[in-house]
């Protein structure tokens, strides 16, 4: 697949879909290029085809990992005689967000970095949703880290990190609930799924934003979203949410609560949230006023969302097992 200009460097990882390996080669201008090649067997070929088709719609999108081909290529593995399916992807030198987090004390990222990363993920989700898709499996393992370096005016170098969303093998068109069944209620990784997706097969923007709230929580706590207890699918069906620690900043609490609230937001609107906008336009002398405003927003948020009931659309398959179509929001 890689062609004569690329050669194998090392294995990067292995998952239920197959494996990812690093290849290196030279461009025509002599510069080195690195490519991450994703390889699957016949069982996961359909998922790989869906992924390359979706990624072909995101060419040049800053927050989406890039694919260097428009179709899956099949080839015969000379060692085991089996057919393999491969796609070439943009290589992330920083690895996944999951591995990146482990480089920090107690696996907790600093607050300014979490805000920046959350803003980048919202930009990626806004792009995905604008194309009519729901990612369905947003989690730290499927978020890639790209180190960037800037040459400053004074001649020094500064570094930062950019995030891109990857792994679209489980992605669906918004509103597509054909994947759901009572025996297989998860669109993606179970601990990042939203209550409505698990209970009713809803594939809406809310699913990705719930998963985003879980990721933000994980960047703060250094643990999985259900860090406070053993996760059970019945917890979601009973309307429970991951616990938000009291030590989180008020802006972060409000943002995560908004991600967990059903049917009240989208990624574009959340980009205007004070958590990702920072303190633009505020003065240090008004810090206490700003905290008071945040506290009032929290109070209003709880008043609006805790005691309301919400009617939702339920697929026929879900109605057979869960006939009550009204849930508490």
Image (cartoon, rainbow, N blue to C red):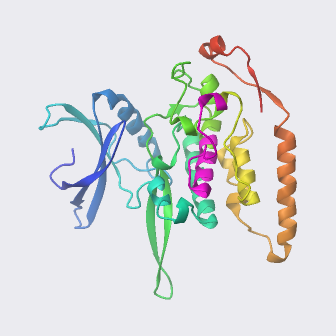
Relative vertical location of residue 234 with respect to residue 272 in this rendering, above or below: above
> In the image, 8: left or right of 266?
left
Asked which quadrant contains residue 52, the reply is: top left
Magenta region, residue range:
210-235
> In the image, 219: left or right of 29?
right
- Which of 71 and 211 lies nearest the eye of the viewer? 211
Is residue 22 visible in this depiction of the protein? Answer: no
How far from the left and from the top, in percent, is residue 281? Answer: 77, 70
Relative vertical location of residue 205 with respect to residue 286 in this rendering, above or below: above
Residue at image location 64% in from the left, 27% down from the top: 234
Residue ranking furthest to the bottom: 154
Residue at image location 58% in from the left, 31% down from the top: 174
- Whether the magenta-drawn stretch holds residue 213 is answered as yes
- Which of 188 and 159 lies nearest the eye of the viewer? 188
Relative vertical location of residue 242 with respect to residue 145 in this rendering, above or below: above
Residue at image location 67% in from the left, 16% down from the top: 322
Residue at image location 13% in from the left, 31% down from the top: 81
Q: How many marks?
A: 0
- Which of 228 and 211 lies nearest the eye of the viewer? 228
How far from the left and from the top, in percent, is residue 317? Answer: 59, 14
Image quarter in which the N terminus is found: top left
Relative vertical location of residue 305 with respect to residue 316 in this rendering, above or below: below
How far from the left and from the top, in percent, is residue 195? Answer: 65, 31
Asked which quadrant contains residue 42, the reply is: top left
How far from the left and from the top, in percent, is residue 311? Answer: 77, 24
Is residue 214 visible in this depiction of the protein? Answer: yes
> In the image, 310: left or right of 97?
right
Residue ranking furthest to the left: 78
Residue ranking furthest to the top: 320
- Which of 233 and 8 lies nearest the eye of the viewer? 233
- Whether the magenta-drawn stretch holds residue 224 is answered as yes
């Amino acid at each position: 697949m890689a062609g004569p200009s690329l050669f194998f460097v090392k294995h990067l990882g292995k998952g239920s879909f197959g494996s990812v390996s690093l290849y290196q080669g030279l461009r025509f201008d002599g510069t080195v290029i690195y490519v991450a090649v994703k390889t699957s067997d016949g069982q996961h070929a359909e998922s790989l085809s869906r992924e390359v088709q979706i990624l072909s719609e995101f060419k040049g999108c800053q927050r989406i990992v890039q694919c260097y081909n428009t179709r899956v290529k099949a080839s015969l593995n000379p060692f085991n005689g089996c057919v393999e399916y491969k796609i070439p992807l943009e290589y992330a030198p920083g690895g996944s967000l999951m591995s990146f987090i482990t480089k920090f004390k107690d696996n907790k990222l600093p607050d300014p970095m979490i805000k920046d990363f959350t803003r980048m993920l919202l930009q990626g989700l806004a792009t995905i949703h604008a194309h009519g898709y729901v990612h369905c499996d947003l989690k730290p393992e499927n978020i890639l880290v790209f180190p960037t370096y800037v040459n400053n005016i004074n001649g020094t170098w500064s570094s930062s990190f950019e995030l891109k969303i990857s792994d679209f093998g489980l992605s669906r068109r918004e509103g597509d609930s054909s994947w759901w069944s009572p025996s297989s209620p998860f669109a993606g990784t179970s601990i990042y799924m939203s209550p409505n997706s698990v209970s009713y097969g809803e594939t809406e923007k809310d699913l990705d934003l719930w998963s985003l709230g879980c990721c933000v929580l994980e960047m703060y706590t250094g643990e999985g979203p259900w860090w406070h207890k053993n996760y059970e699918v019945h917890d979601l069906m009973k309307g429970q949410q991951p616990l938000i620690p009291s030590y989180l900043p008020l802006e972060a609490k409000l943002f995560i609560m908004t991600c967990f609230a059903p049917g009240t937001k989208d990624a574009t609107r959340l980009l205007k949230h004070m958590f990702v906008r920072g303190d633009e336009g505020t003065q240090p002398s008004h810090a206490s006023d700003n905290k008071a405003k945040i506290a009032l927003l929290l109070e209003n948020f709880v008043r609006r969302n805790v005691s309301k009931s919400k009617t939702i659309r339920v697929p026929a398959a879900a109605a057979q097992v869960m006939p009550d179509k009204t849930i508490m929001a």
